[in-house]
Amino acid sequence: MLALLIAFFSQLLIISNGISNSHYFLQQIDSENKYLTKEEHWFNQTLDHFSPYDHRTFGQRYYEFLDHFRIPDGPIFLKICGESACSGIPNDYLSVLAKKFGAAIVTLEHRYYGKSSPFKSLTTGNLKYLSSKQALFDLAAFRNFYQESLNVKLNRSNIENPWFVFGVSYSGALSAWFRLKFPHLTCGSLASSAVVQAVYSFSEFDKQVGESAGPECKATLQEITKLVEAKLTSNPKDVKALFGADELRNDRDFLYFVADAAVTAFQYGSPDRLCIPLLEAKKSGEDLVNAYATYVKDYYVKTFGVSVKTYDQENLKNTAVNGDTSDRLWWFQVCTEVAYFQVAPLNDSIRSSKVDTRYHLDLCRNVFGASIYPDVDATNLYYGGTKIAGSKIVFTNGSQDPWRHAFKQTSSPELPSYIISCHNCGHGTDMRGCPQSPLVPEGDAKNCSSPDAVRKVREKIVEHIDLWLSQCQVSGRSSI
């Protein structure tokens, strides 16, 4: 790591001393334009930020992209990685913002995920340091490390580049919480689709799926759920095989899988991939379960890339550190901090009523042990939930996103909040465009049903970043 840092900053010194500040670093974007960079760097991170006696550390992976960095006083955009392995810096709308503001982009992999695991085994005992609180301190420590390294190599001291923090979904919540807890370390934050409210029984999630689907598609999905439940009672092996989910021995795991497959279409901006074929099958009298199973196998599994074993509780018990650990890790955070239990509402639900609070609690105890329980009250007390009392945080979300009900939807001058309204505007539309997955280079919004709605919110984002960065620069500090 030291050799890489020396090499980078030696180049930075040569360029900053010999070329005007309007020139930029040039790095090779990968051939498919999906990542700005995939070159790994490493940082020694503290394992337990809350113990004065534990001095253990672990290697934490990070990335940097410097093509647009305006030397020496350009801003530094900290993009937070969330609940999965971080394989590089994605080429989403943040790359457009970095070019506009002359910013460097750095991103830190979340502790435990990907290659940033402190332990060789992910037993429940070893997961005790996996929390949003520890992750926030990771970000603070990394931010100071990166800034201090920059100052040393530029032969200066006590100088702060203006920092701005970005995140989507859980990392969007971390972005908001970072500004809340460390306002002196960042000028502001963008909290895209930020799930800042921990929710025990999240029935609003399913209700939003119904609203996003519309009356006809919703009714068809409800009919499919009833048909699947009936087949599961009469011939469970056949119906699971039809969906390519033979390995899900637990019937409620299977019903969760069936429900989640529909959710993805609305969450990630592809509602027509689900609803149009189902409504056509309904009108022509085709077998609805077969039609839905085709969607699940062809889109949810093959195209979207979801693995069926993600829903297998026996798989979640696997404590080996490998490329498939994200599911166990995220479920641990769900089962200890935030819950977000996506349960069936009492009336008019799309998902099976068997996917209830008891199912989620049983999963947590089965996978992690009898003492595991999500303390959502403590989480909301610590961060404030949707009543978060920070400043200079811009919240954004898409109108069709089922997660929007764990998001701060009320707006104020210090905490502006915007909803992008369109037929396929979902999770992280402002950063990812449409559909939200797979990645659209530079977050291009041309395939959103209302590109103008995305453009207007992005203009507001730029206004807030511009104002808050300028206030930092006037004060000579990273925050004010």
Image (cartoon, rainbow, N blue to C red):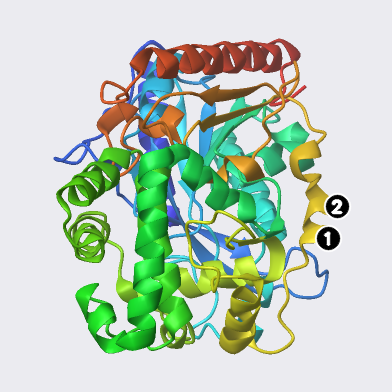
Q: Amino acid at mark 1?
A: Ala
Measuring 45% from the left and 38% from the top, which residue is drawn there? 212
Question: Where's residue 104, x and y in %?
Answer: 45, 30
Locate the N terminus and report the quarter of the image it occupies: bottom left
Taking the spot 37% from the left edge, 22% from the top edge, the residue there is: 96
Please tell me which residue is depicted at 32% across the width and 79% down the height of the picture. Answer: 231
Give me the C-alpha separation between circle 1 and circle 2.
Answer: 5 Å
Q: Can you tell which mark lies on residue 378?
A: 1
**Amino acid type of disc 2?**
Leu
| Residue 462 visible somewhere in the drawing | yes
Query: Label for residue 296?
Result: none
Q: Residues within 10 Å of mark 2 (few under 14, many from 20)?
A: few
Task: Give x and y (percent) for residue 201.
Answer: 68, 61
Picture disc at residue 381: 2
- Left or right, residue 291 beside residue 170: left
Q: Are marks 1 and 2 in contact (CB under 8 Å)?
A: yes
User: Considering the image in quadrants, where does the C terminus appear?
Assistant: top right
